[in-house]
Amino acid sequence: MRTVPNVNPGTRSIQPRGTRYGYENLLKCSLSVFELKPSTHALRAAHPAPVWLVSRARVPFSVVFTAAAFIPGPPLLVPELANAAAAESADLRRAVLDVAGELGLRSERWVVIGVDERPGQVPVHTGADAIGTFRGFGVDVRVTLAPPAVSASNPKLPAPDRNMPLPALIAGWVRGAAAPECRCEVEYVPADASAEVAAAIGRRLRTQLDAAGERVGVLIVADGASALTERAPKAYDERAADFEDALAQALDTGDVKWLAALDERLCTALGACTRAAWQVLGALFHDGVAAVERRFDCAPYGVGYHTGVWLP
């Protein structure tokens, strides 16, 4: 038996090990230098806060690296793209916006860590001034990585980047929906980065965040295994359920050693292609995790998705 935190803060449900991803629940449920510049944003009071953000205390301004949130990166998070699956993915969407809203309360600036799984050269950086669109996924839903100076419908704005990597698109959509006054920039980790390279990226980023002089948070965009069922994108693998339970346990407890030890071959076999992003998260907290909040796990369509917030 293990505790599986519910999406609602303060409530927890108990499930036997292995049932989290049971068939009956599947549909329900290159090193770069991070240049951190001072942000200039309007106060949150100038923007109406989503209901899930009301009545939460903000952290002191003396804190620099305030939190790391982790969310999955499937296009189905965007209701316009989910179509018939919009209702089935509602709990996941709510959990993602919940942790993003929490990160928005704790920081005005986000550094997003993602893995671009497209073949070819991996991008290094997507700046906060970028505009993207989900047109490549079927619908022209536009996103920005910072509060736009004018309406996104203004023709004077640059044309949206149709080739913006999915992690940046997801970060932009989440930012706009949950923390519209925040700004973010996206750094990419190669999918085949070794554990050592991922750890070096995480440690370097932590050093720069601690010296930033402003409240900065990190948003990790990463998925779990994608081989949990016969309907999954990856061929079914019986090892996937145990992997997902172990990953969820590590995220529940802030087990950075488990993340650091992720087996590259196993992750590839199970379709956990964002393994390097999880290892960057672990290296960010090389000195330990003070608290874990707002954890949620589910596995629609045979893919493991996890959300939560780690506090330094």
Image (spheres, rainbow, N blue to C red):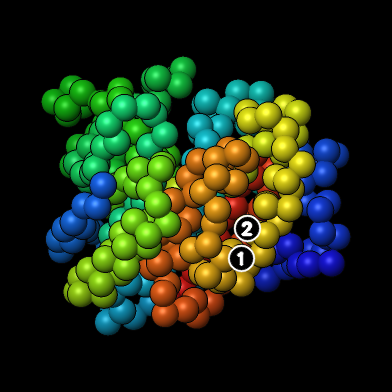
Question: Is residue 93 visible to the viewer in this orientation of the structure?
Answer: no
User: Counting other residues with Cα less than 10 Å from the Cα at mark 1, is it few (<14), some (14-19), or many (20 or more)?
Assistant: some
Q: Amino acid at mark 2?
A: Leu
Helix, strand or loop at mark 1:
helix
In the rendered structure, find residue 250 and report the number of the disc placed on it.
1
Q: Is residue 215 left or right of residue 225?
A: left
Which residue is the extreme one toward the front?
A: 265
Asked which quadrant contains residue 28, the reply is top right
What residue is drawn where x is 40% and y is 52%?
194
Quadrant location of the N terminus? Answer: bottom right
What residue is drawn where x is 66% and y is 23%?
84
Q: Say which of 213 and 306 sits in front.
A: 306
Residue under numbered circle 2: 247
Q: Is residue 147 left or right of residue 189?
A: left
Question: Is residue 35 visible to the viewer in this orientation of the structure?
Answer: yes
Helix, strand or loop at mark 2:
helix
